């Protein structure tokens, strides 16, 4: 799961790193694509995007874990019902 988070956040972290390096070289630097946007705002936006991706991925993992637990429980209930049904039919035909 952590590996998937790294894959999802890697492009954003690379851009964030280049923005940080640019800010360290020039305190009043602007984003190259949008000259009127300050690099600081872009960095904050990228940090928020990374945090959102991590939260969405963690919530998705939690949901999938619960779905797997519910599926396992349903399968166990079905198997136990089948088990008791077989015992019932065996007992019925013995008499």
Image (cartoon, helix red, strand yellow):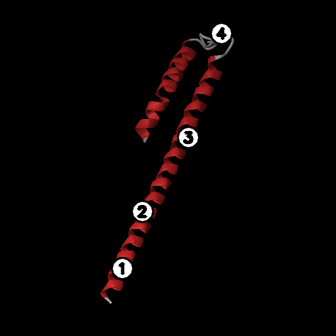
Label 2 neighbourhood size at 10 Å, few (<14), some (14-19), many (20+)? few
Image side of residue 90 versus residue 33, left or right: left
Q: Residue at x 48, y 49 (%)?
A: 64
Viewer-proximal residue among 3 and 93? 93
Q: Are marks 3 and 4 in contact (CB under 8 Å)?
A: no
Residue 56's tag is 3
**Toward which corner of the image does residue 27 lie, by quadrant?**
top right
Q: Earlier in the sequence, mark 4 or mark 2?
A: 4
The percent position of residue 7, horizontal first and vertical second, equals 44, 31
For disc 4, the marked residue is 35
Label 4 neighbourhood size at 10 Å, few (<14), some (14-19), many (20+)? few
Discs 4/2, front: 2
For disc 2, the marked residue is 75
Q: CA distance from mark 1 to mark 3?
A: 49 Å
Q: Are marks 4 and 2 in contact (CB under 8 Å)?
A: no
Q: CA distance from mark 4 to mark 2?
A: 59 Å
Q: CA distance from mark 2 to mark 3?
A: 28 Å
Q: Are marks 1 and 4 in contact (CB under 8 Å)?
A: no
For disc 1, the marked residue is 89
Label 1 neighbourhood size at 10 Å, few (<14), some (14-19), many (20+)? few
Q: Residue at x 36, y 85 (%)?
A: 92
């Amino acid at each position: 799961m952590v590996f998937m988070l790294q894959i999802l956040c890697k492009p954003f972290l690379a851009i964030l790193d280049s923005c940080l390096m640019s800010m360290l070289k020039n305190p009043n630097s602007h984003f190259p694509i949008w000259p009127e946007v300050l690099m600081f705002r872009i960095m904050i936006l990228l940090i928020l995007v990374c945090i959102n991706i991590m939260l969405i991925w963690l919530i998705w993992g939690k949901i999938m874990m619960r779905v797997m637990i519910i599926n396992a429980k349903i399968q166990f209930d079905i198997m136990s019902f089948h088990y008791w049904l077989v015992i019932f039919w065996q007992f019925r035909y013995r008499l």
